[in-house]
Image (tube, rainbow, N blue to C red):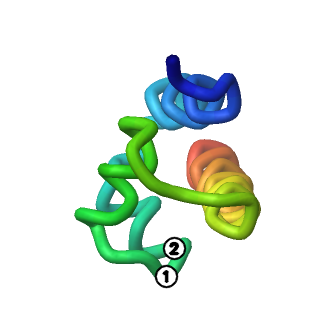
């Protein structure tokens, strides 16, 4: 069973139009690592924090780009 935070991240990514590659780049992780994290295979609390922070930054950018 996937952690609820992963489901939250994936849902928020879909709503905001954020790709796995964008999330990987923003979080400083390799695309393949982010993919395994989002499938519930790898990751720890530090990974969760970095991904959640990166997602928040990308969501903010997406909102700001829609205001223009």
Which is closer to the viewer, label 1 or label 2? Answer: 1
Above/below status of 65 relative to 40: below
| Residue sitting at x 68%, y 56% | 48
- For residue 8, side relative to residue 16 (left or right): right
In the image shown, does 62 or 30 lie closer to the viewer?
30
How many marks are shown on the rendered structure?
A: 2
According to the picture, the residue beneath numbered tag 1 turns out to be 28
Residue 26, disc: 2
**Which residue occupies the foreground of this view, 57 or 48?**
48
Do labels 1 and 2 touch, CB within 8 Å?
A: yes
Question: On the image, which quarter does residue 4 sit in?
Answer: top right
Q: Distance of mark 1 from mark 2, alpha carbons?
A: 6 Å
Local crowd size for mark 2, using a 10 Å CA cut-off: few (<14), some (14–19), many (≥20) = some
- Residue 62: which numbered mark, if any? none
Residue 24 vertical placement versus 65 (above, below):
below
Q: Position of residue 31 (x, y in %)?
A: 28, 66
x, y percent for residue 59: 65, 48
Identify which residue, 8 or 64, lies in the foreground.
8
- Residue depicted at x 34% and y 65%: 33
Q: Secondary structure at mark 2?
A: helix
Residue 57: where, in percent of width, then height? 69, 63
């Amino acid at each position: 069973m996937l952690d609820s935070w992963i489901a939250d991240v994936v849902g928020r990514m879909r709503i905001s139009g954020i790709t796995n590659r964008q999330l990987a780049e923003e979080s400083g992780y390799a695309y393949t690592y982010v993919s395994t994290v989002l499938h519930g295979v790898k990751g720890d609390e530090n990974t969760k924090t970095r991904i959640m922070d990166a997602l928040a930054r990308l969501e903010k950018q997406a909102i700001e780009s829609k205001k223009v």
